[in-house]
Image (cartoon, rainbow, N blue to C red):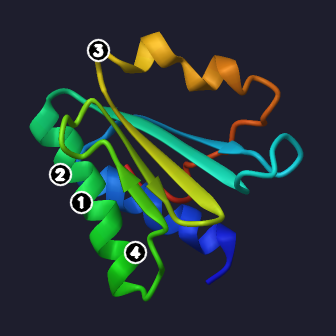
Amino acid sequence: MEPKDKLDLAVRAADDKNAHQITALNMKEVSLMADYFVICHGNSETQVEAIAREVKDRANIAGLDVKRLEGLEDARWVLIDLNDVIVHVFHKDERPYYNLEKLWGDAPVMELEKIIQP
């Protein structure tokens, strides 16, 4: 599966669990870590866990290898590593503290309107 397809899968999975402020950063020119970061948040630990599990489950159904899943126990910041795409699911109280969008401010923000249908 191409990185863009993984991005679409992760964004749709997060959106289906009502993740808030879904943002995707194009990391291709900024970092060797991944092609894309997906950043979103939930309003409770339960929602954070549901979002993360949905991303993981859809990746597994699509036959993708989930390299790493961290933070699910506390559900404050869950990281899901899909190789080319790294998904960060924050609790609403943690997201402003880490502020990954500012930390990786050199990375272009992707337009998600075509992925997320209102």
Question: Which residue, given by chain and number where applicable, does mark 3 sit on?
Answer: 93
- Which badge, 3 or 2, comes first in the chain's sequence? 2
- Which badge, 3 or 1, comes first in the chain's sequence? 1
96 and 115: which one is in front? 96
Which amino acid, by three-letter code, is at mark 1?
A: Arg
Estimate the x, y position of residue 76 in percent, counting from the top left. Answer: 27, 29
The residue drawn where x is 73% and y is 56% is 35
Mark 2 and 1 residues: CB-CB less than 8 Å, in contact? yes
The residue drawn where x is 81% and y is 52% is 32
- Left or right of residue 105: residue 118: left
Question: Which residue, given by chain and number where applicable, does mark 2 sit on?
Answer: 50
Distance Cα–Cα, label 2 vs label 1:
5 Å
Circle 2 SS class: helix
- Residue 13 position by quadrant: bottom left
43 and 85: which one is in front? 85
Label number found at residue 12: none
Question: Which residue, given by chain and number where applicable, does mark 1 sit on?
Answer: 53
Circle 1 SS class: helix
Which amino acid, by three-letter code, is at mark 4?
A: Ala
Which amino acid, by three-letter code, is at mark 3?
A: Asp
Circle 3 SS class: loop
- Which badge, 4 or 1, comes first in the chain's sequence? 1
The residue drawn where x is 44% and y is 12% is 96
At label 4, counting other C-alpha atoms closer than 10 Å, the crowd grade (few under 14, some 14-19, many 20 or more) is some
Distance Cα–Cα, label 3 vs label 1:
20 Å
Question: Which residue, given by chain and number where applicable, does mark 4 sit on?
Answer: 59
The residue drawn where x is 61% and y is 66% is 83
Estimate the x, y position of residue 4 in percent, counting from the top left. Answer: 66, 68
